[in-house]
Amino acid sequence: MTSVAFPSSLPGGPTRRGRTETDVISTIGGTPLIALDRLFDPDRFQVYGKCERFNPGGSIKDRSARSMIEQALKTGAIVPGRSTVVESTSGNLGVALAQLCNFYRVGLICVIDPKTTAQNAAIMRAYGARLELVDQPDPQTGEYLPTRLGRVRELLASVPDAYWLNQYANERNSQAHHTTMREIHEALPDRLDYLFCTAGTCGTLRGCAEFVRDHQLDVTIVAVDAVNSAIFGPPAPWERSHRRLIPGHGAAMVPPLLRAGLADRLIKVTDADCVRACRELLAQESVLAGGSSGAAIAALQSAAEWIEPGAVCVAILPDGGDRYLNTIYSDRWVREHIELSDSGRDMR
Ligand code: PMP
């Protein structure tokens, strides 16, 4: 018989916050850090997952959306009842913005591409967002991002009072993550050695790195990117045959938010690494996490050989797995799309 350790507190104890909230938007942030002791032996080093799925919109992008929208409202760049926010997003930011724009009575047009899942599109529509699908990738790069940005420009020229938040360059995106890192630091004030952070727009990476620098914390930041992503420089020849099907981390360009020196190390992972790690996380810890969470866990697994004994590590888990049931958690999809023997590597 397998023995199972019971959690230290039983249901009925204090809630996550232990207080009432004024509205749904004020529940953004304050997400839990969960020990991952079954996946990583705590006698070697300790790993916690920062579970961003506990945000009301289901992902880390609630923080960025709130920060960007509230700033635009404050400066008068958008006005309730009159303005329309336009953004290029294929997933979590769209859901987060749809939630925020509905709450603040601002219009929203999300420019999406065929990689956007039907479920995410349905959630955005349910909140009242209008969706604009671009179905042709950029002929030069084969990526949808350039075409999506072109459509955003057209909409800005044609829709009255339209406003582009531009998540890739908006510093309110990265500033939102000072709170992410503050929460981690407050939960682990005595010791944190490594932060594993996936990179897309680099909002999370930059916000967390700025907090670490400003508070002179001794934390090594490990950026986790996708094989064949261009964020930290042009992909090496060995990367170029890899397709990136899992959304969230990785980008076809260098995001304007990226700054030199934000990350101390870089690990690149394949889609296969993400799938394997997501499934292990589910099997061992009962945590149903999204693809980029798998990326962070896979990076930690590959770093196990150089992480010193007794170290304390945090992996940011950006969203939940419910949005990937037809991909990462579908055996059929994985059989058809993923070469499970593929693996990424530690870049420095
Ligand atoms: N993982 C998921 C699931 C995401 O939606 C995003 C945002 N694109 C990221 C990781 C990367 O976060 P950031 O944009 O802050 O770099």
Image: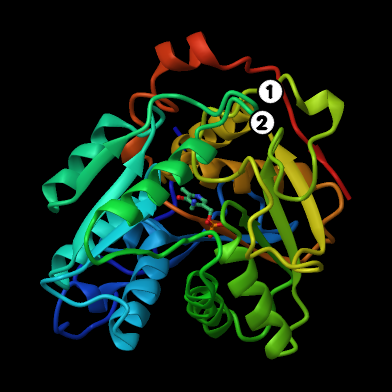
Report whether 157 appears left or right of 249: left
Amino acid type at circle 2 is: Thr
Looking at the picture, how far across and down is residue 205, in whole percent? Answer: 63, 64
Name the foreground residue: 113 vs 4.
113
| 169 w.r.t. 44: above or below | below
Q: Residue at x 63, y 14 (%)?
A: 339
Q: Is mark 2 within 8 Å of ligand 1?
A: no
Q: Is residue 101 above or below residue 116?
A: below
Considering the numbered disc 1 on the image, is that residue within a helix, a strand or a loop? loop
Amino acid found under the numbered disc labelled 1: His
Is residue 98 in view? Answer: yes
Tell me which label, 1 or 2, sits earlier in the chain: 1
Identify the disc placed on residue 322: none
Q: Which residue is mark 1?
A: 242
Residues at circles 1 and 2 in contact by the CB criterion of under 8 Å:
yes
In the rendered image, the vertical position of residue 251 relative to residue 341, given as above or below: below
Looking at the picture, does residue 314 appear above or below residue 143? below
User: At 46% from the left edge and 34% from the top edge, which residue is drawn?
Assistant: 283
Residue 282 in the figure: left or right of residue 219: left
Residue 320 visible at all: no
Residue with the mark numbered 2: 270
Q: Quadrant of residue 324?
A: top left
Taking the spot 17% from the left edge, 82% from the top edge, the residue there is 21
Label 2: how many residues lie within 10 Å, few (<14), some (14-19) or many (20+)?
A: many
Which of the image's four quarters has the N terminus? top left
Choose mark 1 or mark 2, whichever is in front.
1
Frontmost residue, 242 versus 289: 242
Coordinates of residue 108 in the picture (x, y in percent): 23, 57
x%, y% of residue 198? Answer: 61, 53
